[in-house]
Image (tube, helix red, strand yellow):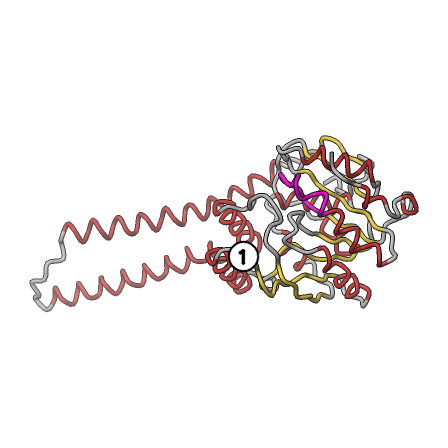
Amino acid sequence: MISTQPLRRGAASQALTHPVISVVAPVYNEAPTLPLFCERVIAALEPLGEPFEVVLINDGSRDGSMDVMRELHAADDRIKAVNFSRNFGHQLAITAGIDYARGDAVVVIDSDLQDPPEVIPELFAKWREGYGIVFAQRSEREGETWFKKATASFFYRLIRKITNVNIPVDTGDFRLMDRKVVDALTSMREHHRFMRGLSVWVGFKQTGVEYRRAPRHAGETKYPISKMVRFALDGITSFSYLPLQLATYFGFFVAMISMLALVAVIILRLAGSQANFYGQASTLVSVLFLGGIQLIFLGIIGEYLGRIYDEVKRRPLYIVSDVLGLNEQQAQEPDV
């Protein structure tokens, strides 16, 4: 049985109050971490003296996370839950959270305690100063391998250079957003979502707060290399046409080289050169090289085409099985 006694403080006084702060946290197989996560979030928010809610989104967990959420909600009705019918993914869990969140300021944070809830008051203070988005920027990343740090650093800097939005480097989804920002995000229903890019794309006054990212409290990472690659592709294809443009640039480059080679061959022939231009090995290598390049760019076109196909099917972004402490009709998803 989970100890929930510390979570009862102040719950009754806020039961029917409109929350000023909503904390949205996706959950996937985080049963051991959830009680401490909620305790630390509540301990961070109560000194602010503002009504708040904690919205947990169960993204198809298989370790009993939903049972833990039920116990936490029974102990403190400020803790609410949205239960997906299956696993839809981290970015769609965030989307559901902001769809259901009612606060004037909405904080998105992972539930694995790598992002410390104690930073939330700093984000809230910046929001009080008039900022629409306050993102948490990692100054250090403890407990992560050099490979993950290097690839993350490369990805953030790459996407900043090739996309048409100024995504801050070394930031994740941990951020606070004003209600106007949240309303803008809920109006966008694209399927392959890169939330940290979308939140910047909508504009508004933005600033950052630095923090040290901690190691995972329990369990293992939910982002293996395959998911990291897919996530990177979603980010790049959502905000950049550069991969498609590369096909055009390379086509012109190959055409130019071919024209120069043709001119060189004609000159050598007119000069009576006996050079052998018909080597089978060189011809085969050239054909295989160009064929490989064509297949790569067909794959890139296929990535964009697949995303178009997903959009035109108009399926819902996620399906909710049940909710705790929330009205099932409360979600702000527009009928589009």
Dot 1: what SS? loop
Across and down, in percent, residue 14 comes to 90, 47
Q: What quarter of the picture does the N terminus occupy? A: top right
Across and down, in percent, residue 335 comes to 75, 39
Label 1 sits on residue = 240
Q: Name the amino acid type tagged 1.
A: Ser
At 86% from the left edge and 50% from the top edge, which residue is drawn? 19
- Lateral position of residue 325 relative to residue 302, left or right: right
Does the magenta segment cover residue 35? yes
Indicate whether 183 appears above or below 133.
above
Q: What quarter of the picture does the C terminus occupy? A: top right
Residues packed near mark 1 inside 10 Å, few (<14), some (14 to 19) or many (20 plus): some
Please identify the quarter of the rendering in which residue 129 is found: bottom right
- Lateral position of residue 138 relative to residue 38, left or right: left
Q: Which of 102 and 314 is in front in this view?
A: 102
At 52% from the left edge and 58% from the top edge, which residue is drawn? 152
Residues rendered magenta in the picture? 25-37
